[in-house]
């Protein structure tokens, strides 16, 4: 896929990290779990993009 998708995945991962850190700071377990889930999904998508790129070359 394109660089735009990679940038979106990186941004989504960063948002997930921020949610997780905010959940840690406020003792909000729901927000912490949501951040971890968002980060995991974005990281999986990013790994998929890297795999696609590897097969293109």
Image (tube, rainbow, N blue to C red):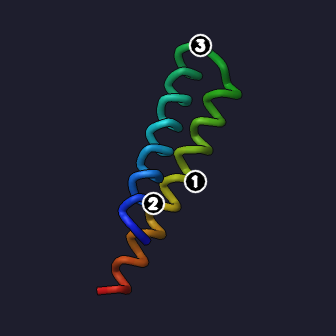
Q: Please name the residue that numbered disc 2 is placed on.
A: 5
Please identify the quarter of the rendering in which residue 26 is found. top right
Identify the secondary structure beneath mark 3: helix
Give the x, y percent position of residue 37: 62, 44
Quadrant for the N terminus in the image: bottom left
In this view, the mark in front (1 or 3): 1
Cα–Cα span, label 1 and label 3: 23 Å
Cα–Cα span, label 2 and label 1: 13 Å
Q: Are marks 2 and 1 in contact (CB under 8 Å)?
A: no
Q: Taking 48 as reference, is 9 above or below it?
A: above
Q: Taking 29 as reference, is 34 above or below it?
A: below
In this view, the mark in front (2 or 1): 2
Identify the secondary structure beneath mark 2: helix
x 61%, y 29%: residue: 32
Cα–Cα span, label 3 and label 2: 31 Å
Give the x, y percent position of residue 49: 43, 69
Please identify the quarter of the rendering in which residue 46 is found. bottom left
x 48%, y 29%: residue: 18
Say which mark, if any, is on residue 19: none
Which of these two is toward me, 7 or 28?
7
x 35%, y 86%: residue: 56
Q: Please name the residue that numbered disc 3 is placed on.
A: 26
Please identify the quarter of the rendering in which residue 24 is found. top right
Say which mark, if any, is on residue 41: 1
Closer to the N terminus: mark 1 or mark 3? 3
Give the x, y percent position of residue 19: 55, 29
Which of these two is toward me, 57 or 22?
57
Q: Taking 17 as reference, is 2 above or below it?
A: below
């Amino acid at each position: 896929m394109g660089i735009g998708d990679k940038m979106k995945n990186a941004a989504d991962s960063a948002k997930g990290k921020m949610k997780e850190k905010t959940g840690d700071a406020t003792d909000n377990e729901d927000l912490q779990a949501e951040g971890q889930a968002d980060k995991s999904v974005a990281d999986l998508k990013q790994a998929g993009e890297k795999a696609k790129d590897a097969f293109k070359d």
